[in-house]
Structures are given as structure tokens and as C-alpha cells.
Image (cartoon, grey):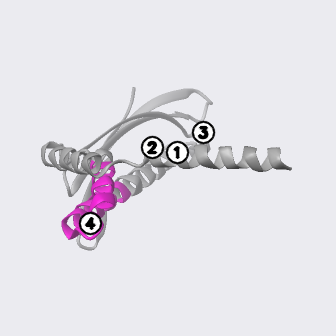
Amino acid sequence: MFKKIKKIAIIFIVMVAIGVYNIPSKEEKEAELIELKAKAKKMNKLEVDENIIVYKKLLEHEPKNNIYKTELNKYIRMDKIAQECRVESRKKDKSSLVNPSTYSDTSDRLEVWENNKIFYTQSTFLGKNKLGLEFKYMAKYKCTIKNDGLSIKKLFLKQI
């Protein structure tokens, strides 16, 4: 019985020591905050995923900072718009085929934000014609955020 208690006590002490060791010091937290602020200032404002990561970390340090909340919400909204644009462009690609059931996304995708309101997505996909021959296509869309929602315009669709 004494051996079990001793073993449990040692495990507890080791776990506490590891936990205390992994807690960053006040100076380390401050250094990380300064680094994050500098990164946020010089970061490309159209790199949505990176901005989301940085602003989430900044909010961990300063949860009541409304500027960080606003910026994070802006980038989350942009990310949702990009996702919606991807989904809708795939639907349009599929419906443009003579045989829509043969649609296959190749995952080749090029995406870029022109500004925080205009997003472009270009993708390739496969589809078969009536004779069963498979072709590869490329399509590009411009997605624009408007007050009444999202406008998706097909810029081109071509066989490659």
C-alpha cells in the first residue's frame, strides 16, 4: 500500500513540475505579444489564413481588444466568403458539363484576393462527354462581396 502511495506521489510531483515548467513567464508572454503585433502590422492583409491565426493569438493575450476582434471577424468573414465562392463555382462547373454526374474535381486551384471585397478562384476539373471521353477543363470566377450578398461571375471556362 505504501509503495502505491509513494508511486502516486512521485507521479503527481512530476506532473506538477512539468506543468509549472511549461507555463510561459510574464516576460515570454510580453515578448510574444510584441512579436505578434509587429507581425500583424507588416503582414499582407490579403493572406486571410495567416491573419486569422495571428489575430486569434493576439486575442489570447488581449481578449478585450476590440480592434483585434474586428480584424479577426473581418478575416473570418473573408474566409467564409472564399469557401462559399469555392462551393458555388464547383456547382457551376458541374452544371456546365453535358454529363454532370462525371464531374471530378482535380484539386488544382489558384485563389487570390484582389482586395477585401473581391476574390478570384481558378480551378481545373474533369468531365466526360456523351461518348464517354474524359476531358480536363479550367474555369475562373470572380466573387464580389456586395451589400445584398455575394455575386459570382464566371470569367471563363475552357477545355485544356
Residue at the disc numbered 2: 21
Q: Tell me which amino acid carries mark 2.
A: Tyr
Dot 2 alpha-carbon crowd within 10 angstroms: few under 14, some 14 to 19, many 20 or more: few
* Nearest to viewer (mark 4 / mark 1): 1
Reading the chain from its start, which is encountered first: label 3 or label 4?
4
Tell which residue pokes out farthest to the right in this image: 1
* Nearest to viewer (mark 3 / mark 4): 4
In the rendering, at what x and y percent does residue 1 appear? 86, 50
Helix, strand or loop at mark 2? helix
Residue at the disc numbered 3: 102
Is residue 78 shown in magenta?
Answer: yes
In the rendering, at what x and y percent does residue 5 appear? 77, 50
Q: Tell me which amino acid carries mark 3.
A: Thr
In the rendering, at what x and y percent does residue 152 appear? 31, 56
Helix, strand or loop at mark 1? helix
**For residue 99, which quarter of the picture?**
top right
Residue at the disc numbered 4: 69
Q: Is residue 120 left or right of residue 16?
A: left
